[in-house]
Amino acid sequence: MQYDPSTLTYPFDTPPAHGEVTEVAPGVLWFRLKLPFALNHVNIYLLEDDGGWMVLDTGLATDECKAGWNAVMNGPLKGQKLSRMLVTHFHPDHVGLAGWLAEIYGLRLAMPRTEYLFHLQARQPGGDMTGEAHRDFYRMHGLGDEATELVMGRGHGYLKRTTMAPPTYRRVRHRDEWRVGGRGFEVLTGGGHAVEQAMLHQAGERILFAADQVIAKISPNVSVHPMEPEQDALGTYLHDLRALRGDVGPDVLVLPGHGLPFYGLHARIEQLSGHHGERCGLIAEGCRAQPMSVADLVPHLFTRALDPHQMGFAFGEVLAHVNYMQGRGELILEPDNDGVCRFRAG
């Protein structure tokens, strides 16, 4: 079947049911684990390997995700083995069960170095976003005391939603060749959503395991966090999207971390770039009328009610756009006597 690379098309209408797997390409299995968020699932892929199946991402450290793994291993993969695991990035829905899988199945971990170190840091005291410096970060950008405490409360969740990754790992790097069952994949990395998120590209078979860098129907969260408050996460993301477009052809089957597999990588990259351009336009519009803080801009971009989990993501994403625009001279900082950073359109 031929697919039009200028549009998005979906070769699989529905995802696999709980405990079931779908073969999405020769030697590639797909299943899903449930998440307790608005984004209610994460995709897990298994690649046929020497002596078993290589695991690509692990799921959240919850009883429900463990039950999903048990259903697959006692069902369609009964009697088969897992050989090793590669985790694409440090977010808990991707690395959460790395320690558990290492313990239960004896799997060795591979991961980009920065992502592995971020995981270790996030599990340390002070790495869970509960320090006073983090509180000051939100206040200086206009978030009220009550909202700040609610958002900061999310930080405790990383410990609850992850198991400690193994103390040793194999590093994967940009442009590495990654051998799986006799096939060679090129490792590509991208920033913005994470720091050094790993993707796997098989050019001959036209397959891209895109992790969360490119998803079909939602924009991956691109945020700035208290640890690096002046980071240009959005600039990095847009740069790495352009690099991905140059490295990977338009006709690959994209296997994302969430949502359905799809064709139309280049079209989706253009859509994502355009989406962030529109967001920058909304911010500029708001800051023309009067100087606005990041907290002021959140409801300007996100009109629906947000719970603390969603507010943290929304706040970080707005700041990513503000930092990007400030670096381009499109916004100018106007600090006020109350210590809150406000921005006007340049």
Image (cartoon, helix red, strand yellow):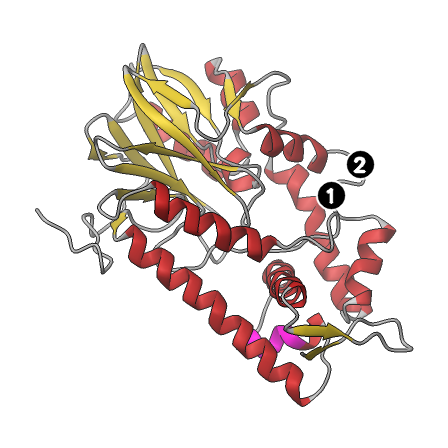
Mark 2 is on which residue type?
Pro
Identify the image quadrant of the C terminus.
bottom right
Q: Residue at x 22, y 59 (%)?
A: 6
**Magenta stretch: dominant SS?**
helix
Q: How many numbered marks appear?
A: 2
| Disc assigned to residue 167 | none
**Closest to the observer, 339 or 107:** 339
Q: Position of residue 326 (x, y in %)?
A: 67, 67
Mark 1 is on which residue type?
Asp
Q: Residue at x 53, y 56 (%)?
A: 221
Q: Would residue 200 appear left or right of 20 to someone viewing this image?
A: right
Q: Position of residue 156 (x, y in %)?
A: 71, 45
Hey, which quadrant is residue 230 in on the image? Answer: bottom right
Contact, CB < 8 Å: mark 1 with mark 2? yes
Distance from the alpha carbon under mark 1 to that under mark 2: 7 Å
Q: Which residues are magenta?
A: 297-301
What residue is disc 2 on? 125
What residue is disc 1 on? 128
Q: Is residue 101 visible?
A: yes
Looking at this view, name the residue that lies furthest to the top.
51
Q: Residue at x 35, y 51 (%)?
A: 259
